Image (spheres, grey):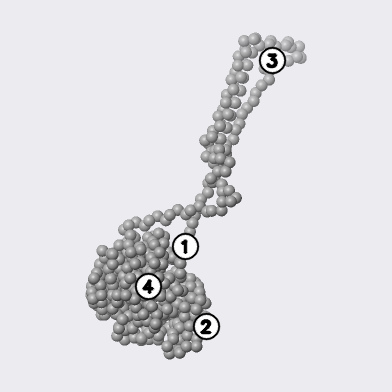
Amino acid sequence: MPGTMSPSGYGSRGRGSGGRGSGGRGGGRGGGRPPRRGAYGGGGSRGRRPDRKTLWRRRLVFLAIVVAVMTAGAVTAWALIDGGDPDLSAIQNDPQPAAVASPEDTSEPSPSPSPSPPKDTVIEIGWVGDTTPGSKYGLPPDNGRALFTQTRSALQKPDLMIANIEGTYSTATASKCDGLDSSACFAFQAPPAYAKALAWAGVDMASIANNHAFDYFQAGFDQTKEALTAAGVEYTGVPDEIPVVDVKGVRVAVLAFSPYDYNPNVNDIPAAVQLVKEADEKADLVVVTMHVGAEGSDKIHTPTGPESAYGENRGDSRAFAHSVIDAGADLVLGAGPHVIRGIERYNKRLIAYSLGNFGGWDNFGVGGNLSLSGLLKVRLAADGTIKGGRWLSLYIDDPGVPRIDTAHTAANLVRQLSAEDFDATYELSADGSFKGD
């Protein structure tokens, strides 16, 4: 069954500026002859001129004052030019200072690297499988919220909750099923406003990499991205995009892959490896989601080698997951087979090969393995170390609404499949909890 995924990232960059000070210079000037004492008139007599010794003393004092004033002015001016103002000094000594860009230089200063989070920082990442927003059989009531009412409290607990969204939030009319047998082709669509139900339920990011992301072609894909953004939900699964989100100060890159060219392609492992390496340079943690594998109630085991469905190459899930971990991924989360599969421990990293279906209104088969589902919660340190987690068992009731299963049926099956299919795993307890490394 087709699926979906979504990408997003921000960044910000700050720029600083400096100021320049200026100094003043002052001085005094004095001169002239000594005033005459006395005056003519009133029968008085003319005063006596100072003697030669007094005149020389006065002239020496005057000369000393002039020399002192001139020296002080020169020193002040030199200090201002040579050391008192760094910006002014730079301009004097360099006709094109580094702080002033030339007309040809349009580059911007490089942003300062984000500080690494403390090594003891631990975040919890949640993942649920195939979720369809709506179908030709109808829409979930309450603007889509009816799908999440029984699991909302659990969805809100992880620091970063990711869901695989199979379908579109769009109003596009042309679909991939036009002209085909309606009983064999399924195109999923809900009004764009229904994306708000994801945010209400606690979903932080949507993976839009799957076989239903293009049910309504490019128009539906673009409208889905717009609807998720408007609802405040991040998305991943757009080719060549590396969405990075901040989770408690930890930079987390989330990449999503499917077997289709409108997403990063799970069958092009060299390209996937390169994208993961680029993400690893941008973020502290790299999470990879994959929509991969054959479909059906009997597809609970993870095979070795590629799988196919409906004539399509649905990827080699083991080879893909191992390759992206070797390239730097810290966690791999799977969906696509519509049933749950086991958990592998590979190079001290966790691979959950499939979480099965999660929710859909009248468009998923239920009963047996098709009703078993889960919400996987994984705690990771900022350096990628697995600190533990839990497979919270869910059961999907008709018409496709998940509820928490206190019998832990899904966790018991995951424990069995993990032991049978993999050499190393994370052992689940009775309630689905597991310890880390």
Say which of marks 3 and 1 sits in front.
1
Q: Which residue shows up at 66% across the image and 21% down it?
A: 31
Q: Earlier in the sequence, mark 2 or mark 3?
A: 3
Q: Nearer the viewer, residue 105 or 68?
A: 105
Say which of marks 1 and 4 sits in front.
4
Q: Earlier in the sequence, mark 2 or mark 1?
A: 1
Tell me how far mark 1 sits from mark 4, CA to CA.
24 Å
Name the residue beneath numbered marker 3: 37
Task: Kindly indicate whether the residue at mark 4 contacts the one at mark 3 (C-beta within 8 angstroms).
Answer: no
Q: Which residue shows up at 51% across the image and 50% down it?
A: 16
Q: Which mark is residue 290?
A: 4
Tell me how far mark 3 sits from mark 4, CA to CA.
108 Å
Task: Kindly indicate whether the residue at mark 1 contacts the one at mark 2 (C-beta within 8 angstroms).
Answer: no
Task: Kindly indicate whether the residue at mark 1 contacts the one at mark 3 (C-beta within 8 angstroms).
Answer: no
Q: Earlier in the sequence, mark 4 or mark 2?
A: 2
Q: Quick one: SS at disc 1?
A: loop
User: Is 54 positioned to the left or the right of 307 in the image?
Assistant: right
Counting from the top left corner in percent of width and height, residue 107 is at 54, 53
Q: Earlier in the sequence, mark 3 or mark 1?
A: 1
